[in-house]
Image (cartoon, rainbow, N blue to C red):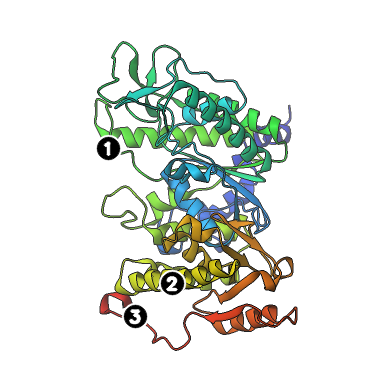
Amino acid sequence: MSHAALLDAASHADPRLDGWLERYEGLLTRGESFQSCFYPGAERGNQTPLELVDPVTRPEPGLITRATRIAAMGSCFAAELKSWLIRHGYRFIEKERDKAAASEGGSAAYGLVYTTQGIRQHIEHAFGKWHPVEEYWKKDGVLTDPYRAMIEWGSVEEMRRERTEHAAAVREVIAEADVFIMTMGLVEAFTSTLDGSAFYRFPPRAEFDPRRHRPAWFGVERNLENLERAYSLMRAHNPRLRLVLTVSPVPLRASVHPLGAVVADEESKSTLRVAARIFCARHPEVVYFPSFEIVRKLEHRPYLDDNRHVKPEVVARIMRTFMMHFGDLPPTAVEAQARDDARFLARSRRSLEFSFRARYLRERILRALERAEHAGRRVALMGGGRHSVFIVERCGLPEAALARLVVLDDAPATAFIGPVPVLRPAEARPGDFDSVIASSDSMEAALLARARQWAASVGESGGPEVIALYEGLPEGPYAAADAA
């Protein structure tokens, strides 16, 4: 085989070699377009401050837009991604919302899934391929799920019925998803000696039996096997599905590793990162996104006081980087988005202004909803952005009140915000509503004008009242701490 043929064969065998001659020339010349070849701060090759370093070298803009149906499964970092996407108006798939905390971390009530073995089990269960021998644990006379957090049953019959419903929900998630974000967290888990199934947590003392329960550390090959199995089932059910793979930057909480939790965490993340690298080389259509590297390598003090969970501003940086390279955020808009994220995070801190805002909005909207209930009508929120998400998810409105709410938006990015439907104004008849509220703190004037236009569109007398939430209120902050 000729030298050129050998080079070509090697390039096809390992995508990392694609374009290696150009990168070699870049190393020699230290060209600006080859800064990613140098570790940040290495000699004169890359002097960019860490907080400005962009580690993505294989972008695919437009993979995610506000029309894309997005699903997720994985560790607690998957929950952070979910929260950001919903808050910014993307179409995040949510099933089994009635199961509360069990559905908060992803698209269905599988709870937080820390290992690839757990991911595989959930996907196999959805398609009738996994039937654990140890079906439940008992706690104070109640049956609990060893494989999903916050799931309990009153009887074996209820358990089997709920599991059947859950399997159907996971199948729906996979069938509907255009993009599925999978976050790998750990390689350590307690497993059943009866069939090798991995539990979501260590067994409680009342259930623990060293003959049935043993810790396991899944190596690179086992993680690859789990990823291959889960991915093949997902693609067989939905061939158009695109997978985005990440490694969670959140350290493990505890370990029975003989060298302790710090060493176990390093071993865990290293194993997952190697498995991800090999898996993505096998499947070039799979996107690996370096959220792990951004947190661990490019941020100074990235964690909250618990030293585990990532600060919201770091999550915002990760998502801006992701949406610039794989979403619909133009590079020219990144700085504006950063300022917007900073303002939102400042408002969301538990300050006097935050508390006032939540309580004030709750009382104003409850009064409007009470009046609407007496009239047999509903209340509309004009605007489907972050402010409406805040009202629905953060103001503590009761379920009965939310049932009378509708969100109106001229270009809806999602069909629901929580349980509240999102409609175009043309799809809702003003005569069915007692009031319409301009739902924005930054664009209230524009939304008031749109609300008045819609309210008057049918020419009916006694149309919905148009309500301004912030007109006449003094601007915050209301304490020195709020400005921090």
In the picture shown, does residue 211 fall above or below 12? above
Give percent across and percent down for residue 123.
57, 29
In the picture shown, does residue 263 fall above or below 461? above
- Report the amino acid beneath label 2: Leu
Give percent across and percent down for residue 448.
59, 82
Tag 2 secondary structure: helix
At a point 58% along the width and 75% down the height, the residue shown is 435
Q: What is the number of the mark on residue 477?
A: 3
**Residue matched to label 2:** 361
Residue 479 visible in the shown view: yes
| Dot 3 or dot 2, earlier in sequence | 2
- Report the amino acid beneath label 1: Val
Residues at circles 3 and 2 in contact by the CB criterion of under 8 Å:
no
* Circle 2 crowding by C-alpha within 10 Å: few under 14, some 14–19, many from 20: some
Residues at circles 1 and 2 in contact by the CB criterion of under 8 Å:
no
| Dot 1 or dot 2, earlier in sequence | 1
Marks 3, 2: nearer the viewer: 2
Tag 1 secondary structure: helix
* Quarter of the image where the N terminus is located: top right
In the picture shown, does residue 26 fall above or below 356? above
Alpha-carbon span between mark 1 and mark 2: 44 Å
Quarter holding residue 458: bottom right
In the picture shown, does residue 388 fall above or below 240? below
Tag 3 secondary structure: loop
